[in-house]
């Protein structure tokens, strides 16, 4: 091995375990014990995390005649210092410029300067036929996310354009990221405040209150529902927007959502700092009342919010922020965060008991990587081995070592396996999980024991499949459901609907959060069994057989 990281405690979104990591040619080649390498780093007593991923940054961003104070060199150095090894920036086309041309220009600005890996989101500022025609071609080239704005005159699209863009994105598998604020309401409130002589930074949040954000979120989510397009809501700041997202998910929509450290840890009180200090905190949407902190942290811990990103866009206080000294509407919007995101989430999230170690990795690395097509090359610690050109094997451990399938097969041949179902009947099992590797694992296990297995990616699909199976006269004998599905309906919501369809539904809940109240009191919520992640295969099979038997 070129490099071995020894004795560290590896933390991923699902596991915490001690092992050595062997690196060859810049890639993880082996995870195990007692590894040797040309260079060794002793990580005893330390956590080893995946490289963190920030999917919302604005480096070297030009607005009018000024450019933000971090370029691709300084900004990515700061990212690396804070543990972030991958960023996703934006392509903002100039008036009359095609998306293809804008991508080329942005690549030219970044290539050769970045200190970490980077990718780009597209941005659409219109729904012209030429723009819509470019999306499938760019998606095929790997640009599979699209930023849309409901405010800022140079960037925003109206409802009709939004609907066309959402429909086009849905058709070519592009995920829209949406900045939700009602532009007309903002313009009305800004004009009213200025007319009253209210020009200081403290009036910035009054020009963009929570209702302005939530109204736009409700509207965008309704439009997305019309064309069945999944969406990603950027920088959620308040309870009102969380409720809008929750209602959309209850309707069966796929909605992902992000929060920034600024909105978790700072408040509108910071706009009242002495002198012009409040200008440092002028960003949009603004900092909110402290009461929103609790709602945001809870949503982050429980799956209502999927990622933590920064919206990093710094401006110099001594010069650039001074443009708005006499008029808060002229203060360049934005703040730094690319270097401090991970340390802050660890200290204020994990350190204060708001997030588990696994959830910390999930929201800062794994979920961002999965949502934007970077997983499993990014977002986790796993072995990637290339056998020959065109063939790649990714090795993950979604199940515990004890009670492995191979061990159970051997025991079954010896007549020692108590987990087998001796009835001779094939049972129909519906498995709901958004993780493809976990679905594959469960499918292999249950198929080996004679069951017929079908899969659903979220609660809405589970409900549909369960209802159709009952109507066809071939009902499922049991359902295994993940408690939470990022951006979609999880087991805790789906069980309520399944009980309406079939009061006798035999449902098993699974989760990596074994201390979740629903896991601890699963029967009260309508489940017949519970299995913790990572799975012990013996426990999974025995629980399933027990639930089917009604014991």
Image: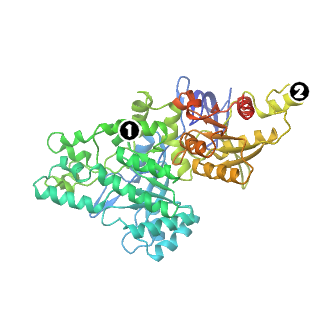
Q: Is residue 212 left or right of residue 73?
A: left
Percent of width and height locating residue 147? 43, 60
Q: Earlier in the sequence, mark 1 or mark 2?
A: 1
**Residue at 78% across / 34% down in the picture?**
405
**Colour convention of the picture:** rainbow
Marks 1 and 2, how far apart at CA: 53 Å
- From the viewer's side, name the closer residue of 215 and 345: 215
**Residue at 31% across / 62% down in the picture?**
152
- The numbered disc on residue 415 is 2
Percent of width and height locating residue 234? 41, 51
**Residue 19, visible in the rendered structure:** yes
Quadrant of image for the N terminus: top right
Quadrant of image for the C terminus: top right
Q: Is residue 27 left or right of residue 270?
A: right
346 lies above or below 172: above
Q: Is residue 133 left or right of residue 538?
A: left
Q: Name the residue at the top extreme.
A: 45
All told, the count of numbered labels is 2
**Residue 42, visible in the rendered structure:** no
Percent of width and height locating residue 210? 30, 49
**Residue at 13% across / 52% down in the picture?**
198
Where, by quadrant of the figure, is residue 173 drawn? Answer: bottom right
Give the residue at mark 1. Answer: 295
Within 10 Å of disc 2 (Cα), the crowding (few <14, some 14-19, many 20+) is few
């Amino acid at each position: 091995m070129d490099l071995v990281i020894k004795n560290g405690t590896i933390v991923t979104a699902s596991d915490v375990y001690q092992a050595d990591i062997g690196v060859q040619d810049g890639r993880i080649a082996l995870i195990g014990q007692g590894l040797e390498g040309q260079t060794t780093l002793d990580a005893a007593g330390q956590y080893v995390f995946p490289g963190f991923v920030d999917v919302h940054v604005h480096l070297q961003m030009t607005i009018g005649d000024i450019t933000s104070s971090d370029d691709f060199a300084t900004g990515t150095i700061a990212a690396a210092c804070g543990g972030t090894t991958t960023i996703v920036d934006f392509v903002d086309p100039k008036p009359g410029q095609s998306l293809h041309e804008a991508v080329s220009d942005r690549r030219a600005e970044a290539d050769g300067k970045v200190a970490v890996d980077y990718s780009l989101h597209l941005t659409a500022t219109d729904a012209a036929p030429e723009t819509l025609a470019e999306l499938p071609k760019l998606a095929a080239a790997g640009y599979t996310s699209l930023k849309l704005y409901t405010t800022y005159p140079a960037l925003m699209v109206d409802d009709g354009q939004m609907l066309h863009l959402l429909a086009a994105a849905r058709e070519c598998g592009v995920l829209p990221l949406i900045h939700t604020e009602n532009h007309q309401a903002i313009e009305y409130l800004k004009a009213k405040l200025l007319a009253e002589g209210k020009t200081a930074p403290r009036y910035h949040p009054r020009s963009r209150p929570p209702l302005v954000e939530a109204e736009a979120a409700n509207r965008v989510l309704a439009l997305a529902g019309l064309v069945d397009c999944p969406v990603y809501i950027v920088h959620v700041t308040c309870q009102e927007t969380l409720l809008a997202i929750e209602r959309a998910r209850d309707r069966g929509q796929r909605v992902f959502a992000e929060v920034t450290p600024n909105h978790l840890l700072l408040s509108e009180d910071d706009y009242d700092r002495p002198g012009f200090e409040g200008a440092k905190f002028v960003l949009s949407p603004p900092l909110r009342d402290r009461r929103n902190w609790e709602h945001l942290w809870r949503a982050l811990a429980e799956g209502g919010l999927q990622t933590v990103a920064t919206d990093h866009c710094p401006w110099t206080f001594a010069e650039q922020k001074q443009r708005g000294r006499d008029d808060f509407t002229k203060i360049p919007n934005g703040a730094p965060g690319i270097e401090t995101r991970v340390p802050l989430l660890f200290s204020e999230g994990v350190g204060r008991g708001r997030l588990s170690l696994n959830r910390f990795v999930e929201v800062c690395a794994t979920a961002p990587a999965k949502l934007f097509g970077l997983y499993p090359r990014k977002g986790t610690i796993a072995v990637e081995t290339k056998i020959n050109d065109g063939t790649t094997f990714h090795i993950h451990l979604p199940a515990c070592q004890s009670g492995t399938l191979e061990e159970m097969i051997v025991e079954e041949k010896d007549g020692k396996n108590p987990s087998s179902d001796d009835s001779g009947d094939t049972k129909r099992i519906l498995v709901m999980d958004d993780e493809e590797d976990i679905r594959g694992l469960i499918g292999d296990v249950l198929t080996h024991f004679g069951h017929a297995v079908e899969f659903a990616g979220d609660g809405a699909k589970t409900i549909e499949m369960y209802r159709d199976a009952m109507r066809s006269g071939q009902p499922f004998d049991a359902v295994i459901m993940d408690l939470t599905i990022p951006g979609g309906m999880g087991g805790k919501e789906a069980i309520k609907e399944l009980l309406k369809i079939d009061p006798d539904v035999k449902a098993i809940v699974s989760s990596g959060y074994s201390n979740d109240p629903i896991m601890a009191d699963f029967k009260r919520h309508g489940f017949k069994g519970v299995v913790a992640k990572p799975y012990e295969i013996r426990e999974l099979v025995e629980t399933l057989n027990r639930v089917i038997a009604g014991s």
